[in-house]
Image (cartoon, rainbow, N blue to C red):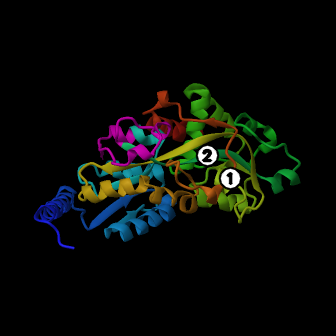
Amino acid sequence: MRLSKKQLLSLVVLFLLLFASILYLNFSQPKLENSLVVYGPEGDEYFAKALISAFQKRFGVNVTYVHYGMGAIDICNKLISEKNAPQADVILGIPDFYSKVVIDSGVLETFTPNNLSLIPRSEIFDSSGYVFPLDKGYILITYNLTIIKKKNLPVPSNLDDLLNPAYKGLVFYQDPTTSGTGLAFLVWVLSVKGETEGFSFLKKLEGNIKFHPSGWSSSINALKIGEVAIGSMFSTDVGYSEVPNLTTTAEVGFVYREGIALVKGAKHPNAAKKFIEFALSNEGQNLTAPYNYMYPVNPKASYSDIAYAPIPKEVITFNTSLSGNVTQWLELWRREVKSQ
């Protein structure tokens, strides 16, 4: 079948338009740099490396994850200390209740991810466009049922239960100056009770505290050997194989939300923005539950890997009217609570 001149001309025009479109897309899209540095807490390393591996396969960017053995607060402070000579391009694992401290320090850059619409508005805790939601989990009052039964103790369900004199020397919560989980517990107390009453509660609670673990590993080890029996842990820690009798009533819990952000003055800004968009995508969010034991914030992502974890009947969120006071709280906690 022979084509008419008009048909040939139409095909040529279509070809030229297609070619022009390809050229436009090729040159209008920012070219990704070949390397990227991501900061984050040590506790997020497993998840971060899964994200990085998938991102590298997709975009061919060489990504390095750096945590310096630090928790969420320390790595945020590390970034702040490098304000005049930033070493990272992206930081992940920023707790929502510490985000104002990081934002106010001037170390982050705003931008709008192309796929931000994938995330429900209810999950966005920073409306200024600096920090984007990455994942969330639930901090609960957990207990080693073996020890509770052995000592014939009542089961704790809420914050005030922890003051029971029968629990003396059996209670813990992580050091909030080194642990994001510990700081989440402190923020939970203050969000419910306010600053004055909250610190009064923490001082009273210190009479029952065995010690303040530095992070997750030391908490699990203490529960495993029976050094402590009751304390704050994530809902996904319940039933952990090394502490098979760790459980919870899940009556009430605090939602711990983590964010991801672009570093101001990043050496690899285009790759950094693409990495953040990838972390919010269906593919990136599907790595949250199996690799971070947290819930994705993208509703299309699966969390079947943590379906076993209890969700608290009553969920406490961060009281945003307290934003920006974390540094003062930590100093007050060091001075008036830990030193007791």
Which label sits on residue 309? 1
Q: Residues within 10 Å of mark 2 (few under 14, many from 20)?
A: many
Magenta stretch encompasses residue 11: no
Magenta stretch: give its range: 101-130
Q: Nearer the viewer, residue 94 or 199?
A: 94
Disc 1, SS = loop
Quarter of the image with the C terminus in it: top right
- Residue in the picture at 33% in, 62% down: 37
Q: Quadrant of residue 163?
A: top right
Q: Position of residue 193 (x, y in %)?
A: 61, 28
Q: Nearer the viewer, residue 141 or 34?
A: 34
- Say whether residue 137 is left or right of residue 8: right
Quarter of the image with the N terminus in it: bottom left
Q: Quadrant of residue 6?
A: bottom left
Residue bearing the label numbered 2? 138
Task: Say if mark 2 contacts mark 1, CB within 8 Å.
Answer: yes
Q: Nearer the viewer, residue 224 or 269?
A: 269
Q: Position of residue 252 (x, y in %)?
A: 69, 38
Could you tell me the amino acid type at mark 2?
Tyr
> What's the magenta bit mostly, secondary-structure-wise?
loop
Visible in this render: residue 340?
Answer: no
- Residue in the picture at 85% in, 45% down: 153
Query: Residue placed farthest to the front in the image?
Result: 1
Of callouts 2 and 1, which one flags the residue occurring earlier in the amino acid sequence? 2
Disc 2, SS = strand
- Say whether residue 53 is left or right of residue 84: right
